[in-house]
Image (cartoon, grey):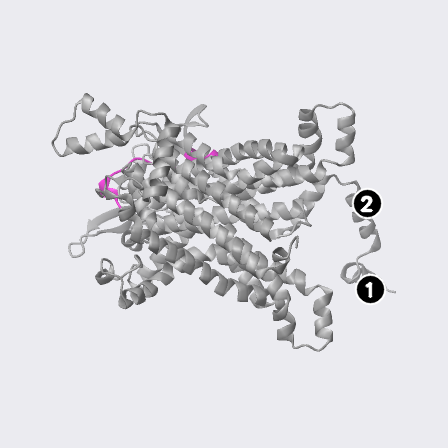
Amino acid sequence: MLNFLIRRTVFMFVALFAVTVISFFIINLPKGDYVTAYIAQLQATGSLVDADEASNLRKFYGLDRPLYIQYLKWISQIVLEQNLGFSFEYNQPVTVVIAERLLLTIILAIATIIFIWIFAIPIGIISAVKQYSFWDYLFTFLGFIGLAIPDFMIALIMMYLFFVWFDFSPGGLFSPEFSQAAWSYARVMDLIEHMWIPIVVLGTAGTAQLIRITRANLLDELAKPYVVTARAKGLSEWKVIAKYPVRIALNPAISLTAYILPFLISGSVIVGVVLSLPTVGPMLVKALVAQDMYLAGGIILLVGFMTVIGTFISDLLLLWIDPRIRFEGS
Amino acid sequence: MNYLSKIKNKFFSDKIPEEIIVQEDESIQIATQRQLIWRRFKRHRLGFASSIVVILFYVVVLFADFLATSVPVHYGAARGFMPPQPIKFFQEGDFLSVCHVIGERNLESFRMEHTADCNNREPLQLFGKGYEYKLWGLFKTDRHLFAMKNPDANVDEWIHLMGTDKQGRDVFSRVMHGTRVSLTIGIIGVGLSIVFGIFIGSISGYYGGLIDSLLQRFIEIIRSVPTIPLYMGFSAAFPADWTINQVYFMITVIISLFAWTDLARVIRGRFLSLRDEDFVVAARLNGASTMRIVFVHMLPSFYSHIIAQASLALPLMIVTETSLSYLGLGLRPPAISYGVLLKDAQNVQAVAHSPWLFLPAIFVIVVILALNFMGDGIRDAADPYQEV
């Protein structure tokens, strides 16, 4: 158990480090640096900056130093001061700009995972227990399609159908009166009312995948002798299935969550744009188009962190739920 | 036994005559690996039917210009939002013809309303002359599947098999060109990831040990990071003055930069399981070089797995390109790809009034589904014992 825990923790830190390097790399990709952008902004407001001043500014921000020193400076700022840099588009520190959107992104991701579990596991169990029944075929077919069609296409189709059938365009996570309001009970209820469309759109692929995995694993388990023994001993059918086979079949379901999390976050960025959600997705696109690199890099960094830490949490869950890993080596 | 019942026995008995079973057995025994896979694939009905759809799509890729009716970037505000024009068959002596469409602005809704006036028709010609293009960039020609018979008639004003978009560009021609761009990005991207995948997968699987675990952790890290934001970050950094071709090439490279991991894992697994097989050991003892063992002895034994994995990676690449272009971070107009076309379908209200703008989406869905089903079919055929 300790071994597993140490391995996963070390891996998490290495992955976090990799995310920071990639984010820093992306921030530095476009031509020009912070000072170029700053000068452009100053010039737009009418003040002039000469070459001397520019090089002084560069020295002040350490932009004349080699890249790895800049990286160290950037990363220590993040770790020590929670400072992700400054957004030119919004004229505010990046952390202030992203805070609420990041929170909504996290809420959306967690809600989607819960949605996936709630729907996929029972359906997977039904499909396995009633193999080759009508429901099994129906869900297998739907699963295939749900897995193949990219989520932003599902979003587009849903928007179109809603508009044609109900004459309303789904979008956003709040009604207009709540979009800028402070958090309150009414706002939370409003969020829940709006959230189900993006959840369904985002969760379709994951649900399809989890149904397949649960079905396959449970089918393997159901064929094993201990199930036959349990049945021969006269246990009720419900108990025969739910007590052990389902529990074992659930382990891959949990480790699969770690696997689908990156896809979920990737998807939420695009779906966020299609459905104009107040998540980090649309903001990332805007920031990239405007080359507001500290904002874009900050979003990529935090989204990456979210995924890596989410993966780690699902590892811990696996540890908690699967005694075979817990007692390994002891 | 009379003659009739003999026939009946021969054709309608439930039992399969013995000689056929024997025949099949023999042919299975002498069949090569490739023949066996092909046979299993043919039996996979969904996969087989899908592969025909995929082939049709790649025919479009090869002959996009020939199939397109008008230059896909030709615009004309007066022709905006024209509904699809069906081709009429056998009308008054013309084999194929199209009706003239008159657009009129409805003064209440301020929307263009189009009516077809079939008294005013123009005949069409198969394999007739249209705009000039270079087939595969080599042969100059101006032949098209559908063209106007009358050389004075302007194609842009007549043939719109799938209607026109806001700027009056022909949606059908644009879909044909978009198919070519999006599907070739997929193919080239898959080619690049196969190269990466074979390179890293074979090193990892062949040497094993420390190198293997380092490479596996590396792959794990890449897989644990959400790729779309990264793709977006990279493609936003393209200089604005790059040509379409440069952007096209870089997008392909970036997509395959992260997409090779699945392939590498499959290849590594195969290498690990084959590493100590007799034929590999024999080759090693005979003094064959590592390169020779890898490329001549080991790789050919699981080509089919690579092909299966590659055909499953293809739809993923197409989706990635489509998403990036849709967000405005991939290919940008005047380039045409599925993503660029879908961007036109972004405005729900416009689509609700002119639903044909949504046709590109159907093309994308069909090709993605077909590629997925085909990939599944190939995988099942290549390795019937593989678990989900």
Q: To which residue does mark 2 refer?
A: B26
Which callout, 1 or 2, points at the residue further toward the start of the chain?
1
Disc 2 is placed on an element classified as helix
What x and y, as percent, mark residue B212?
62, 36
Q: Chain of mark 1?
A: B
Of residue A297 and residue A52, the one placed in the foreground of this image is: A52
- The magenta stretch is B62-80
Can residue A127 be seen from the camera position used here?
A: yes
Query: Identity of the amino acid at label 1?
Result: Ser
Using the image, determine if residue B62 lies above or below residue B99: above
What x and y, as percent, mark residue A264?
44, 51
Q: To which residue does mark 1 refer?
A: B5
Crowding at label 2, few (<14), some or many (≥20) Cα neighbours within 10 Å?
Answer: few
Alpha carbon distance from label 1 to label 2: 30 Å
Residue drawn where x is 30% and y is 55% of the image: B352
Of residue B352 and residue B103, the one placed in the foreground of this image is: B352
